[in-house]
Image: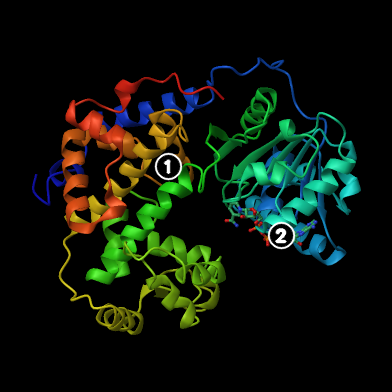
Amino acid sequence: MTENAPRARAMSGTTGADVDAALEHVRTAEREAGNLPGLPQLDPGWRPGRAAVVGAGTMGGGIAMALASAGVPVTLIDRSTQDLDRGLSRVAANYAASVRRGRLDEAEADRRLARISRAIGLEAVGDADVVVEAVFEELSVKQDVFRAIDQHARPGTLLGTNTSALDIDAIASVTSRSQDVVGAHFFSPAQVMRLLEVVPGAQTAPLTVARLMALGRLMGKVPVRAGNARGFIGNAMLFDYYRESLFLVEEGAFPADVDRVLTGFGFAMGPFTMTDMAGHDLGVESRRRAIATRPESRRYADLDLLLVDLGRLGQKSGAGWYRYAEGDRTPRPDPEMNQRIVEYSARIGIERRRIGDDEILRRCLCALVNRAAWLLGEGIAAKPGDVDVVYVTGYGFPAARGGPLYWADSVGLATVLDGVEHLHRTHGAWWEPAPLLRRLGRANATFSGLGTTGAPA
Ligand SMILES: NC(=O)c1ccc[n+]([C@@H]2O[C@H](COP(=O)([O-])OP(=O)(O)OC[C@H]3O[C@@H](n4cnc5c(N)ncnc54)[C@H](O)[C@@H]3O)[C@@H](O)[C@H]2O)c1
């Protein structure tokens, strides 16, 4: 196929009937995400009498709010009075904002806030049926916290960790009850975002998975089972998608071009606006350390490290890929940053070229589809609908397009495979086609034809 093949249908608008069918697919996939073979039936009235959330930061506060909103009393635990004061005032401010915007009446906001109590120290997990840990993303810190939880929690308490990227088994291994430990990956802001990746470790009991799924539904979330591998489902796909976005900018596009094309497709926001929101300094030191030892056989996207060198940490510092006026979150293209990007390309020996919108869309979307096909083949994602649910509910993929794999089916997998094979030949190793995509593409089959049974929990 030619460079532009999946373009025609991807770029052509969709009809009202296409949109209805895509939305119906998402609704069905959300319902089916919870159907995991091999899970025990819980009593339908099962709910925890009390939950504890460890870490009153961005995520812990949001998770406590989501629990309180579902009627579950919560103990929010942190290390010090100051940490708790900061966390709880953020929670109170979030409730006040909901009242101001008319989303919640004041009496209900007060009831929810009253369900959240505070404690210092991990002894306080002792009366909880569910504990969700949301402390710093450092394995040793989480292991210390889980050792203490193991000491104080009652037998049979569900123990969730909100880690984004650490190995669930490494966390569970410091406890005497790995069967009760499970990844509970909420998304930010946790009181709003509907996705919950449920990540069983090697020893996690099916009952623990069933309980976390039920708890997620009680909290109004859409729980999706994901395998315990780097990035689980959503972030593993995001790594490829963002890397491709960075390559496009190294080669000639500007951040605003990529964001415009992806929001034009229907994404809630483009990758450069999104990473400006998240901040660019997360995990930078370990990335810099990894540069020294990584294999030289492939190309790496280090362009974003330039931002940190320039002190452009994102919205929080007033500048990232874009610049931001004081007190205003509108991303504004910044000629100075664009000039730095042009200089960077020259420094790494790339002659910049004009990159068309078709190429931007094709490379970003095919990166998602190919990674998803790898994840399905490896059992990290149990079924295609799960991938679509993760991307629609957690990553701003347009529901009206049905999710990345529904979109790929609508374009035709032979066409998508052709595109990925072409990119593999021209852009190298990151683009190695997933065996599942090869098989389906060659047979002119679809992801949806794989069915919805899923792998055992
Ligand atoms: N921020 C996000 O967008 C996001 C999204 C998904 C998952 N996560 C994950 O959620 C976790 C928390 O992230 P965050 O952004 O809320 O971090 P944060 O820095 O805002 O909050 C962490 C909190 O944990 C507390 N803490 C640290 N050690 C503690 C201990 N020993 N005992 C009790 N409290 C302790 C800190 O005082 C702080 O209040 C991390 O594992 C992160 O990877 C974050």
Name the residue rendered at 32%, 61% in the picture: 245
From the viewer's perspective, tell me whether residue 5 is left or right of residue 80.
left
Disc 2 + disc 1, Cβ < 8 Å: no
Question: Residue 281 occupies which quadrant of the picture?
Answer: bottom right
Disc 1: residue Cβ within 8 A of ligand 1's nearest atom: no
Name the residue rendered at 28%, 68% in the picture: 249
Residue 19: image location, x then y, percent: 29, 33
From the viewer's perspective, tell me whether residue 328 is left or right of residue 251.
right
Residue receiving disc 1 = 391
Q: Can the viewer see residue 412 in this picture?
A: no
SS label for mark 2: helix
In the picture shown, does residue 280 fall above or below 8? below
In the picture shown, does residue 336 fall above or below 439? below
Spatial CA distance of label 2 from label 1 is 28 Å
From the viewer's perspective, tell me whether residue 456 is left or right of residue 169.
left
Name the residue rendered at 16%, 38% in the picture: 415
Residue 243: image location, x then y, percent: 36, 60
In the picture shown, does residue 388 fall above or below 7? above
What amino acid is labelled 2 in the image? Arg
Residue 172: image location, x then y, percent: 71, 41
* Few, some or many residues within 10 Å of mark 2 (<14, 14–19, 20+): some
Q: Which quadrant of the picture is home to ligand 1?
A: bottom right
What amino acid is labelled 1 in the image? Tyr
- Comparing labels 2 and 1, the label whose residue is closer to the camera: 1
Name the residue rendered at 69%, 16% in the picture: 44
Residue receiving disc 2 = 90
Residue 298: image location, x then y, percent: 32, 61
From the viewer's perspective, tell me whether residue 38 is left or right of residue 445.
right
Disc 2: residue Cβ within 8 A of ligand 1's nearest atom: no
Q: In front here: 11 or 253?
A: 253
